[in-house]
Image: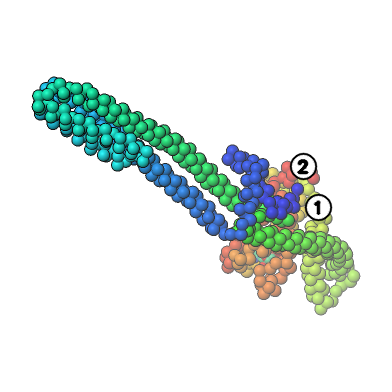
Amino acid sequence: MAKEQIADPGTFALAQGPSGWGERIAHVLLTRSPLGKLVRWVASIKASVHAKLFSGYMLVTLLFLAMGGMSLQTIAKMSAQSQLLDQAHERVHWSQDIQHALALQMNFTAMALLLKDETTIAKILRENNRFNNTLARLERFARPEERDLIQRIRTAQESALTTVADIANFVRDGRVEAAMSLQLNKEYPLYLQIEELVDQVVKREQEKMDSLRASVGATNQRSLIVMSGFVASSIMLAVLLGFVISWSFILPVQEAHGFVTEVAKGNFRATINVPNRDEFGALADRMNQMGKELHTLYENQREATRQLQTLNEQLQQASKAKSEFLANMSHELRTPMNAILGFIEMLLDDLYGEIPPHIRDPLVDVQVNGKHLLNLINEVLDLSKIEAGRMELALAEYSVQDVVDTTRASLQSLAAEKGLELIAAAQETIPLAFGDGKRITQCLMNLVGNALKFTKKGGVEIWVEQKRDKLLYRVSDTGIGIPPDQIEHVFREFRQVDATITREFGGTGLGLSITKKFVEMHGGRIWVESELGKGSTFFFEIPLRVNGGKPA
Ligand code: ADP
């Protein structure tokens, strides 16, 4: 049934069912999720296809740029944190260095008491310097609350150094006991105090480094989560954008396809309705307009066909009436004509007394013209009977040889009058044929009559042969021939090649068309080969036995 409308106004109706898996999923998404609305919304944006595509690509590009920017930021943050971690590590290292220098300092002080030499005392001073330098470096990066601790270390270290100097002097003076007592009572407790303070520093630096490490780990994890979220949402957004934009173009194309299919099926009432306000929308409007025009054209054409049909029927009726009129008229004309010819015959045979010679000649003229007129009436009668569908063949067995002989006998004198040679023969082996022998004789006589009429010198040859279950009749002459452009017309009613020639030779232009019709009624065909100025050969081929030889 014709589809009145493909889609509801402002909606896509998915003209065809989805074919592949991809399209099936898209179909579900478009009909059962808000994506369908989004697609319609994008389609209804008043912008060109180019602008829509460009905006889509720009949006995706911006997303990727933002993703790149975010990655760079994360990398910068991570590198700053690893720098901080490095510094913390270095400070832990320094505080451990101080610890080490202090231990060596204590060790060398004890050794100086045992060895009592200057080299060991110098080593104490060197370790002291290392201690002070490293402490100074640590102080530079220390937080305010640590500064106090460092200050206390420094004060204790200074008094330890003063005590070491006193011990060194006692050692140089050989007062070992005084040096040992100073070492045990002052220097050693001082070292213990410093060691405790340095331990605190080491511990604090270590703690700071641990907390920094933990915060770097947490930051890294957070960045990873944020980045993955961003990447995932960017990809989702890009896919969504691609889906929505592409379907806002695919759907009108599918609608157009549905519309064209409907139009191709002959449903010119089909319309296409899309919400697009872009080139696709304009195309849909044009297609609707085209559909309307096609519909109008189709209706006009239907009306014209209807009128033509009515006219044709009227023409057929008129033609039938004409044929019937002609058939009736010819029949009515034939009877008096035959009577007239009969009376003239009797007059000429002197049945009404002897005819004076000066009356005989005009009477012969009346007889010749009367016969001609009767012939014409007969032809018109035949043609109109055939056209009115009232002509029937009298099917019976007949001899082809008889057909040839009758034709020759009838036309021999005409040929002789014109000084033309008439040769007529048939293949001897032809068996009895089945058809309307009288009509076939009439056909052959028409062809031979024409051949004699249109030939001035030379002759006419008749030949019939059997070709399997067919008979081939051939009439060739050495006459005026037929121009190539006229050959296909000679078998039509009232068609004569040239009016001047006809005037010279006489005739009505009905003979060949009647012959053609009789041949066709026998299930055969007729054709001609001719060369202008050299002659023509007419052929007709009919079944040896019409309808297989069974009486109709
Ligand atoms: P008619 O002979 O009465 O004019 P036909 O239907 O028998 O009508 O022939 C139609 C026309 O075909 C003729 O007028 C003539 O121009 C052409 N024609 C027919 N037979 C021949 C022929 N043997 N040679 C040349 N022209 C022919």
Quarter occupied by the C terminus: top right
Q: Is residue 445 left or right of residue 120?
A: right
Is 360 placed above or below 293 here? below
Q: How many marks?
A: 2
Q: Is residue 175 visible?
A: yes
Q: Residue furthest right?
A: 352
Mark 1 burial class by Cα count in 10 Å: few <14, some 14-19, many 20+: few
Name the spot of residue 121 as percent of width and height, x first.
13, 29
As drawn, the label of residue 191 is none
Instruction: Indicate the amino acid at tag 2.
Output: Lys
Q: Quadrant of residue 294?
A: bottom right
Q: Position of residue 67 (x, y in %)?
A: 46, 46
**Residue lying furthest bottom:** 358
Say if residue 445 shows up in the picture.
no
Residue at left offset 34%, top offset 33%: 205
Q: Is residue 337 above or below residue 217?
A: below
Q: Which residue is mark 2?
A: 550
Q: Are marks 1 and 2 in contact (CB under 8 Å)?
A: no
Q: Residue at x 9, y 24 (%)?
A: 174
Judging depth in this view, the residue of 9 and 512 nearest the camera is 9
**Of 365 and 23, the residue lying toward us:** 23
Q: Residue visible at 87% across and 68% down?
A: 340
- Three-letter code for the amino acid on which mark 1 is drawn: Glu
Q: How is the image coloured?
A: rainbow
Q: Is mark 1 within 8 Å of ligand 1?
A: no
Secondary structure at badge 2 equals loop
Residue at which label 1 appears: 392
